[in-house]
Amino acid sequence: MDFKQIEAFVNVAKYKSFSKAAEATFLSQPTISSHILSLEKELKVVLFDRNGKDIRLTEAGKIFYEYAVNLINIRNSAISNLSDYDNKICGRITIAASTTPCRFLLPYMIKTFNDIYNEVNYDIKEGSTQYVVDQLLAFEADLGIVGEIIEDCKLNYTKLFEDELILVSNLDYLPETIKINDLIKLPFIQREDGSATRHVFERSLEAKNINIEDLNVVLNVNSLEAVIQFVKNKLGVAIVSYYACKDLIEAGILKSHTIDDFKVSRPIYLVCHNKKTLSPAAREFILHIKQMQFNFFD
């Protein structure tokens, strides 16, 4: 049974004529007759009493007619709703993001998107880069935002912009600019081994022939928020994202320091599963943040 057969049946019932049903649907009369015969054969009932040109629904035909009309209406409603769905930006977007993007970049992304499309809701998941990747691979998130790449053939990464990593402290004696060798002597607050910030910092140190073990690490901390709190309480210095401390630096609560001849930055990536079918809202959000890549916090 297909919709062509059902439509033929409804039109014959409506016009009480095979020929008029054929005219109304721009089909030949033999085609209409073939659809009705196929339908009767599949349903194993006679749908019409045929007496010359006089065509009437049988009792079985009357019962089926209600179902047939409902089926066509449901199909038309589905097509209409899907058309609206594909053109209307609404619904829910699930976003997985690592710590810095989630806390300090994603709110700005969503705010600017929400200014344009205010019928979208969000499910935000924060975790490590590996967690974000796992969520995407399990189809539990529409998109991810991370600070490093974990290679997987199912994932596509797009660089959004460059995130500057800076040295911050609350130490009165520390000058605005220090040398790389002075950094080794300072009490250092270090992120956990799985942190993207730490990985980038380690690689930058290695480029200067410095091992991270050469640092005077006084605290190992597994969250960015904890790092900032320890720095605020003058327990040491730390390398963090500029965006994570921007407000605190501007408020004079933390100080930003330049390390002479040592600049550290990392890309922030949008990551998506290449086999996931995205909603119109998710597709539009991705387009939105890609267009933002050159004007973050101008």
Image (cartoon, rainbow, N blue to C red):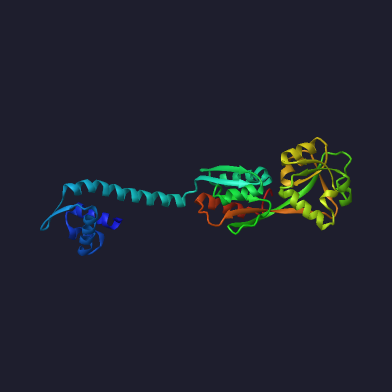
List x then y, in percent, for residue 36: 22, 57
Residue at (62% x, 48% y) in the render: 132
- Which quadrant of the figure has residue 272? bottom right
Q: How many marks?
A: 0
Quadrant position of the N terminus in the picture: bottom left
Residue lying at 20% horizontally and 61% vertically, measured from the top left: 33
- Which sits in the foreground, 212 or 63? 212
Outermost top residue: 233
Depth check: give the residue in front, 177 or 52: 52
Q: Is residue 253 visible?
A: no
Q: Residue at x 38, y 52 (%)?
A: 79
Please name the residue shown 24% across and 46% down the image: 66
**Residue 28: x %, y % from top left:** 22, 64
Q: x, y (%) of residue 281?
A: 52, 49
Q: Is residue 293 left or right of residue 217?
A: left
Is 69 on the left-hand or right-hand side of 15?
right
**Residue 26 percent across, percent down from the top left:** 25, 62
Q: Residue furthest left?
A: 52
The answer to whether residue 163 is left or right of residue 231 is: left
Let me know if residue 288 appears in the view: yes
